[in-house]
Image (tube, coloured by chain):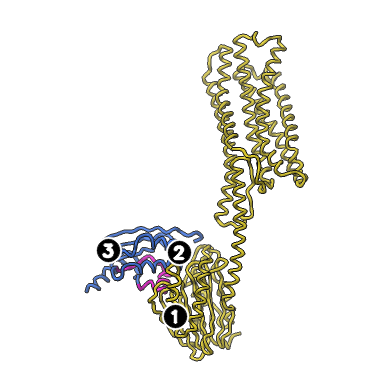
Chain colours: A yellow, B blue
């Protein structure tokens, strides 16, 4: 697979070199026709054949250089353990610049040598040249240098593009140190090169006019300038887009972290350059590593907190004489602010308590634990459900200091008198299910922690055989479905009326939970406690 | 509902009514914003006799938001203002009753009804 990737890359390189060579050939031909004044027939007879051979030779030479310079990559792909990643990565990062510099040096050295060799072959000295020939020589030299610059910048841009997927595929995330560079350098070099191309292209035409003493063709000059400008802008944009793409990879990573995407916690961004973008990538990877460790640490703590919180709550199934109790308590996060309790007060009475601390997560969980302890103390002090709440509220106002509030409902079932006594502190009114009828047990009042002077009252309902009571928190009625529709009180009442009263309470609760909407994105803690009185006929 | 909608507040004062239009969600964070938006304990101004909350552009109110509303209404100088609201759906109307908010806040179906209702209440008190 790796062997194939390397082979494919080398084929792409050869095609690139051929393409760039052909592009150079087109430029030479256009120069010969429009500026040199040669006919296409003449060029087809001799020049084009010679230039074609040169293009193929150039592509072969470049291919050999590429094969030699990218040898570490080949070794790495075959045997990663034997080749240092950093060396391969650096070679890939630096290769486009090497080719650019190589091409420029070749242009500077080869062109003067060629012209000197031509003079020498003609038996002429540089001092023997007339003004006209000097203009012509200058024009040729400038054309060659401009051509080399065009091909070099094109080569640099296209090689960077070609190597990018290979650089991304390398496990460069582990890189932390490498020779530093600045993105200003390639940017400034590219900018200057492209500016030179834009200026030199029409200048070559001017030199030709000066040497041949011809009249200026303004349309031709405008076309040359326009073409040079178009080329420069295109190549510059390609380079800038490459920088932008590298930055976008980083931006995507940071945004994913902000969205709390857990998958990204263990992903690292590839390092694609030695410059500031590459260093930003390293800083991002180190930050992500740090966050991942912290996150895992917090997760462990939260899991522990969840276990502790669950231990504070009673079992979810209870049988208290003729009363069957079933409950669920699902926090939206690892820990939550919802709670319930089943407390045996004496031989005759037991209490069902349900509560919800405003907010969720760890702060709510801490308040919930404190409230549960306070409640268990106060409820043992005796009195009606309302009196218990009144005492509890005074303690809550002092404890919460106006920062949070708690809604709470206490239902006391008297087995001897067969009554249900309920008092609520701003909590969702429980429902009584008698036969097919679903009735709310209203008891409006402030949540705990709001007003110290509040006196809570209770309602007492005589029980009939088969009566069921449902206590719940706001997370149940405010659950959203995938379309964003809230269940609401009416929706919840419909769910309750559909429950099969002849089945055991645990099954009824299971059926109720099944009907609750999910996936609406507003996950809140959910708690439901269901009590059924005298279930002698239950199947 | 995935993302919490930021709460925006706009006050309109007309004919002795102080109308507070709420837009967005009322949660713990926005509830704190609401409570610190102005010094409610100082009152609403000498010419104001009624305070009306417009919930018609509120989509979601959680338990912490309800607690914040309770605190706001309790922090207003006692007996100085008649208070009402409109724009609540069935769900929140019911919820407001459960948490005792209706002890402070009369619920009306619309702005005009709220203004007329509170005006009448004032006349009844004066009688």
Q: Residue at x 57, y 16 (%)?
A: A207
Pick the front one: A352 or A90: A90
Q: CA distance from mark 2 to mark 3?
A: 28 Å
Residue A80 within the magenta-colored segment of the rendering: no
Q: CA distance from mark 2 to mark 1?
A: 26 Å
Q: Which mark is residue B28?
A: 2
Q: Residue at x 61, y 24 (%)?
A: A146
Check chain identity for marks 2 and 1: say if they share one: no
Q: Which mark is residue A423?
A: 1
Mark yes or no: residue A437 visible: no
Return the residue at label 3: B48
* Whole-percent x, y for residue A473 in the image: 50, 73
Q: Secondary structure at mark 2?
A: helix
Q: CA distance from mark 1 to mark 3?
A: 37 Å
Q: Chain of mark 2?
A: B
Q: Secondary structure at mark 1?
A: strand
Quarter holding residue A18: top right
Pick the quarter of the image with the C terminus of chain A: bottom right
* Whole-percent x, y for residue A374 in the image: 49, 77
Mark yes or no: residue A134 visible: yes
Q: Chain of mark 1?
A: A
Rate crowding at label 3 as few (under 14), some (14 to 19) or many (20 or more) other CA atoms within 10 Å: some
**Figure check: A323 above or below A165:** below
Rate crowding at label 2 as few (under 14), some (14 to 19) or many (20 or more) other CA atoms within 10 Å: many
Which residues lie in the magenta part? B81-103
Check chain identity for marks 1 and 3: say if they share one: no
Pick the front one: A190 or A232: A190
State which tag comes first along the sequence, 2 or 3. Answer: 2
Quarter holding residue A296: bottom right
Pick the front one: A370 or A157: A370
Q: Chain of mark 3?
A: B
Q: Is residue A437 left or right of residue A63?
A: left
């Amino acid at each position: 697979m790796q062997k194939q990737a390397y082979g494919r890359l080398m084929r792409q390189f050869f095609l690139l070199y051929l393409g760039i060579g052909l592009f150079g050939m087109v430029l030479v031909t256009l120069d010969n026709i429009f500026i040199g004044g040669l006919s296409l027939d003449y060029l087809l007879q001799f020049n084009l054949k010679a230039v074609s051979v040169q293009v193929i030779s150039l592509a072969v030479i470049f291919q050999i250089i590429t094969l030699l310079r990218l040898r570490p990559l080949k070794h790495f792909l075959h045997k990663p353990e034997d080749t240092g990643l950093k060396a391969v990565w650096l070679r890939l990062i630096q290769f486009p610049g090497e080719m650019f510099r190589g091409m420029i040096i070749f242009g500077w050295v080869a062109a003067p040598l060629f012209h000197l060799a031509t003079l020498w072959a003609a038996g002429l000295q540089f001092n023997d040249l007339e003004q006209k020939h000097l203009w012509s020589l200058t024009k040729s030299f400038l054309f060659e240098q401009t051509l080399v610059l065009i091909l070099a910048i094109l080569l640099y841009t296209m090689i960077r593009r070609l190597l990018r997927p290979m650089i991304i595929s390398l496990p460069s995330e582990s890189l932390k140190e490498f020779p530093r560079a600045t993105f200003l350098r390639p940017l400034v070099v590219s900018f200057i090169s492209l500016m030179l191309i834009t200026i030199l292209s029409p200048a070559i035409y001017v030199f030709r006019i000066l040497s041949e003493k011809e009249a200026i063709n303004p349309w031709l000059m405008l076309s040359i300038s326009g073409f040079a400008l178009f080329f420069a802008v295109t190549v510059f944009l390609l380079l800038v887009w490459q920088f932008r793409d590298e930055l976008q990879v980083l931006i995507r990573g940071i945004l994913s972290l902000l969205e709390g995407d857990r998958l990204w916690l263990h992903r690292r961004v590839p390092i694609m350059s030695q410059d500031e973008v590459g260093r930003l990538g390293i800083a991002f990877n180190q930050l992500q590593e740090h966050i991942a460790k912290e996150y895992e640490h917090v997760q462990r703590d939260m899991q522990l907190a969840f276990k502790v919180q669950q231990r504070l709550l009673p079992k979810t199934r209870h049988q208290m004489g003729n009363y069957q109790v079933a409950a669920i308590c699902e926090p939206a996060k690892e820990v939550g602010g919802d709670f319930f309790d089943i407390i045996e007060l004496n031989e005759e009475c037991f209490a069902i308590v349900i509560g919800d601390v405003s907010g969720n997560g760890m702060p709510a969980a801490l308040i919930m634990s404190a409230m549960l302890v306070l409640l268990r103390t106060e409820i043992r002090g005796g009195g009606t459900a309302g009196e218990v709440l009144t005492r509890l509220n005074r303690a809550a106002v002092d404890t919460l200091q106006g920062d949070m509030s708690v809604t709470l409902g206490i239902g006391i079932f008297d087995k001897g008198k067969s009554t249900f006594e309920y008092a609520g502190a701003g909590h969702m009114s429980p429902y009584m299910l008698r036969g097919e009828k679903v009735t709310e047990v209203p008891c409006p009042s402030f949540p705990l922690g709001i007003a110290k002077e509040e006196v809570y009252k209770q309602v007492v309902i005589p029980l009939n055989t088969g009566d069921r009571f449902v206590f719940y928190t706001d997370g149940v009625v405010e659950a959203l479905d995938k379309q964003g529709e809230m269940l609401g009180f009416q929706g919840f009442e419909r769910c309750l009326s559909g429950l099969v009263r002849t089945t055991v309470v645990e099954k009824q609760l299971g059926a109720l939970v099944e009907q609750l909407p999910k996936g609406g994105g507003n996950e809140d803690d959910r708690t439901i406690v269901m009590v059924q009185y005298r279930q002698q006929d239950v199947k | 509902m995935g993302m919490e909608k930021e709460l925006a507040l706009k006050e309109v004062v007309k004919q002795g009514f102080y109308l507070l239009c709420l837009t967005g969600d009322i949660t713990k964070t926005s509830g704190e914003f609401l409570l610190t938006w102005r010094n409610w304990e100082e009152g609403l101004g000498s010419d104001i006799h009624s305070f009306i909350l417009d919930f018609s552009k509120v989509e979601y109110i959680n338990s912490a938001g309800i607690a914040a509303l309770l605190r706001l209404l309790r922090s207003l100088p006692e007996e100085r203002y008649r208070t009402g609201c409109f724009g609540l759906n069935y769900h929140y109307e019911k919820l407001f009753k459960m948490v005792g908010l209706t002890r402070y806040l009369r619920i009306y179906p619309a702005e005009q009804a709220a203004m007329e209702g509170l005006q009448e209440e004032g006349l009844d008190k004066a009688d």
